[in-house]
Image: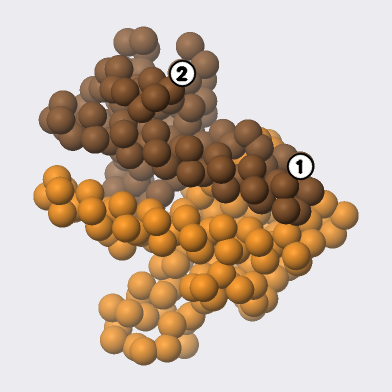
Amino acid sequence: MRMIKRLLALDGVNVVCHFRDDGGFVEGYGLMSRDDMVRLARFAHDYRRMIQGNADQLAMFTGMRGWTPPRGWIVRGAAQSVCGVGNLVCMVDSAGAPLNEILLELHEVSHW
Amino acid sequence: MVILDDLMRLPGAMAAFEFRGSGELLEHRIAYPDRINPTTLDLLAHMCSANTSIATMQARGWEQMTAMKGFYPVQEFTLIGFDWSVVVSGLRRERHKQAGRSSLPPFTGVVLANESADYEAAFALLEGGGPAS
């Protein structure tokens, strides 16, 4: 799964991590210690599960199709943002990063 | 509300809305009433409010644990669903807090069709301008 490295070539991408379905760290690259990458993977796994549960409940309560299964999420801070798609998570600069392109690339790489 | 009308001009915009920090829906615009209604928007607003709060807790904890900065306060939260996405922002509230104002404006959000969603444009619009008067 070294293909996730190509995400680092995109402007503003600082870290990318791949995790298993149980949240276990598989691999990560970028400007972060391995210990923090393991924590980032754990956070992304937990957050993904929460998002999935919320989207399921939204669909159940409203009857509106098209929310589930969710494809991803973005949490955007003043300087740093975190994006998750599938079992991948990346940390990007909030300013100037080509977010649309990053999301497309995450979606594509997450299927490999 | 000018911001809601501007958000409705984004590619793929299905609805734009404002909500309290506690999640109650306030103002809204809907482009396709056959697909999304105010009841759905209200529940969506509550979900976004909850997620933003949890993300804020995580950002706070992450910064304390790692000494990394730039995550807190959380400005926007985005859920990318299978066909639809929702982008919500609390940035206007943060600007009011930083200006020392006690009365905070509502959160603002937009629902987009994924096939034409432009997240960068949505963030740019939600982050534009200064504190609401």
Judging depth in this view, the residue of A36 and A9 nearest the camera is A36
The residue sitting at 38% across, 54% down in the picture is B55
> Can the viewer see residue A78?
no
Check disc 2 and report the residue beneath it.
Answer: A109
Q: In the rendered structure, which amino acid carries the disc numbered 1? A: Arg
The answer for which chain carries disc 2 is: A
Query: Taking A45 as reference, is B86 left or right?
Result: right
Colour applied to chain B: orange
The relative height of residue A31 versus residue B95 in the rendered view (above or below) is above
Tell me, yes or no, whether the two marked residues, 1 and 2, touch with CB atoms within 8 Å. Answer: no
Q: Is residue B49 left or right of residue B53?
A: right
Q: Residue B119: percent from the left, percent from the top? A: 53, 46
Dot 2 amino acid type: Val
Q: Residue at x 23, y 22 (%)?
A: A29
The subunit letter for the residue under badge 1 reads: A
Which quadrant holds the N terminus of chain A?
Answer: top left
Name which residue lies at 64% across and 43% down.
A56
Mark 2: secondary structure: helix
Neighbor class of circle 1 (other Cα within 10 Å; few <14, some 14-19, many 20+) is some
Front one among A93 and B97 = B97
Q: Residue at x 56, y 33 (%)?
A: A71
Residue B75 position, x and y percent, is 39, 60
Chain A shade: brown
